[in-house]
Amino acid sequence: MTQEPHPSTFERLKAAYLMPFRALAAALRLSVQNRQSIREFTQRPRVAGILKYGMMITLLTWLAVALLNREEDDRLAEAMKGLWPALQEEEPRTAPADR
């Protein structure tokens, strides 16, 4: 039974330096594989049709929201601000020079 020698300091530094690059390369390989499988999946006729209709419904919904939300009607903006309390205006803030 032979023991493996401990890696030298240079080898450990080299491995630590190369680690992010190896992780990036692995992520890119995975991305390419996913892109190919998604391309194959979306080229199926039924899936392509569902996606096309889904995109059209989404587009028409956003157009309806844009047309129904006029500038003088602030209901949508106020409803969105109500979701985030930090966006609600308590007092108008003034610059230090205006005080």
Image (tube, helix red, strand yellow):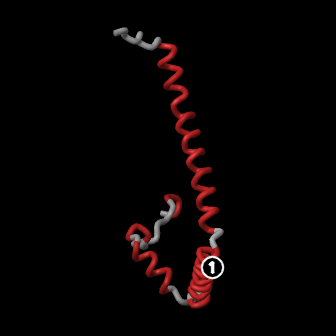
Tag 1 secondary structure: helix
- Residue in the image at 44% along x and 75% along y: 81
Residue beneath label 1, please? 49
Q: In front: 55, or 64?
A: 55
**In the image shown, does 67 or 8 lie closer to the viewer?**
8
Relative height, residue 15 to residue 1 (above, below)? below
Q: Is residue 2 left or right of residue 73?
A: left
Name the residue: 63% across, 79% down: 49
Q: Position of residue 48 (x, y in %)?
A: 63, 74
User: In front here: 70 or 64?
Assistant: 64
Q: Position of residue 23 (x, y in %)?
A: 52, 38
Count of labels in the image: 1
Within 10 Å of disc 1 (Cα), the crowding (few <14, some 14-19, many 20+) is few
Q: Is residue 63 above or below residue 20?
A: below
Snapshot quadrant of residue 52? bottom right
Would you place residue 48 above or below residue 35 in this image? below
Residue 75 appears left or right of 24: left
Tell me which amino acid carries mark 1.
Gly
Quadrant the N terminus occupies:
top left
* Residue for point 58% across, 39% down: 25
Image coords of residue 26 (percent x, y) = 55, 41
Percent position of residue 53, x then y: 61, 82
